[in-house]
Amino acid sequence: MNTIFIVLPILTLLMFDLGLALRPADFKLILHRPLPVAAGLLGQLVMLPLIAWAVSEGFHLAPLFYIGTMLIACSPGGSSSNVFSMLAGGDIALSVTLTALSSIITLFTVPLIMAWTTQSVGTGTEVSLPVMNLLMQNIVLMGIPIVLGLVMALKRPVWAAKIHGILKKCAFPALMFLALVFFLQHRETIMREFVTLGLSTTIMILSAMMMGALLSVVFRLKQTERRTIVIEVGMQNAAQAITVACSPVVFNNETIAIPAIIYALMMNVLLLIYVAVIKHESGK
């Protein structure tokens, strides 16, 4: 089974669902509360890739895993972060805004960061990045579905709400199904490399969450905003990373997607623990 035929519809539906959840007021949050938005974007778009680079260098990851680790780190925020923010008693409006902004900004930053990554890793990998192909793929698979969802939300709000309710429930099971299929196809490689990649990924996620907490303190954010920033900086769109890795017009290499699969597993485990700790401390 070719994974790309599973991940493409999942990614498209996730982005369409994000558009359905957006409202023009979400973008006004940049003007009304610039500090939490700036903290979230700084943590996710700048600090997380830097953390991924440091971890990749520190663990001396193999070139393809190095590329895959950088790819998941520079991908946009995951749509599930909105649900996690709600469970953690965070700022849902801020979560939606950050997810939307990171999805739009990374349309252009992912090609730039990955072009640098493939060049810095070296020519021995036999991996090249067609930057324009990646840019166009991002626009088609992410930009257009977000716009279509936003238009439907504005023109047909009742329909949009019903469809959003359905897609929101399907998103997580769809990603888990993708992870299962990918694991079955690459179980030997994943099991062989799980100790190294599992540890490096765990350190990367925990470092990202701590960076989110640190930025929240530096920017003097409220408690609800802090919880959301921690979640947003740590949670990434694994479907986007897998799509780029497996796409026949970009990398066309499923090995590059393995770090994203492990990241998807570990981020859900670690963030669920984070939510459980918060609920325990708040007595809920």
Image (tube, rainbow, N blue to C red):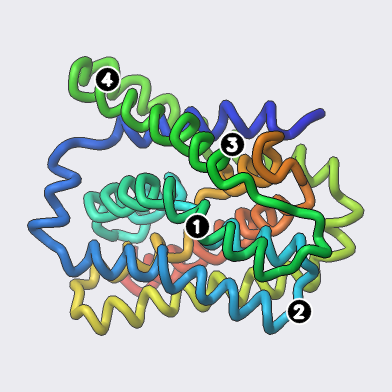
> What is the C-alpha distance between the residues marked 4 and 1?
31 Å
Q: Which of the two discs, 3 and 2, labels the residue nearer the N terminus?
A: 2
Task: Report the quarter where the N terminus lies.
Answer: top right
Residue 152's label in the rendered image is 4
- The residue singled out by tag 2 in the image is 60
Q: Nearer the viewer, mark 4 or mark 3?
A: 4
Q: Is residue 225 left or right of residue 58?
A: left
Q: Amino acid at mark 1?
A: Leu
Q: Nearer the viewer, mark 3 or mark 1?
A: 1
Q: Nearer the viewer, mark 2 or mark 4?
A: 2
Q: Which of the two discs, 3 and 1, labels the residue nearer the N terminus?
A: 1
Crowding near the residue tagged with mark 2, few <14, some 14–19, many ≥20 C-alpha atoms within 10 Å = few
- The residue singled out by tag 3 in the image is 173
Q: Is residue 27 left or right of residue 42?
A: left
Q: Which of the two discs, 4 and 1, labels the residue nearer the N terminus?
A: 1
- The residue singled out by tag 1 in the image is 112
Q: Amino acid at mark 4?
A: Met
Crowding near the residue tagged with mark 1, few <14, some 14–19, many ≥20 C-alpha atoms within 10 Å = some
> What is the C-alpha distance between the residues marked 2 and 1?
22 Å
Q: Residue at x 39, y 46 (%)?
A: 103
Q: Amino acid at mark 2?
A: His
Q: Dots 2 and 1: beta carbons under 8 Å?
A: no
Secondary structure of the residue carrying tag 3 is helix
> What is the C-alpha distance between the residues marked 2 and 4?
47 Å
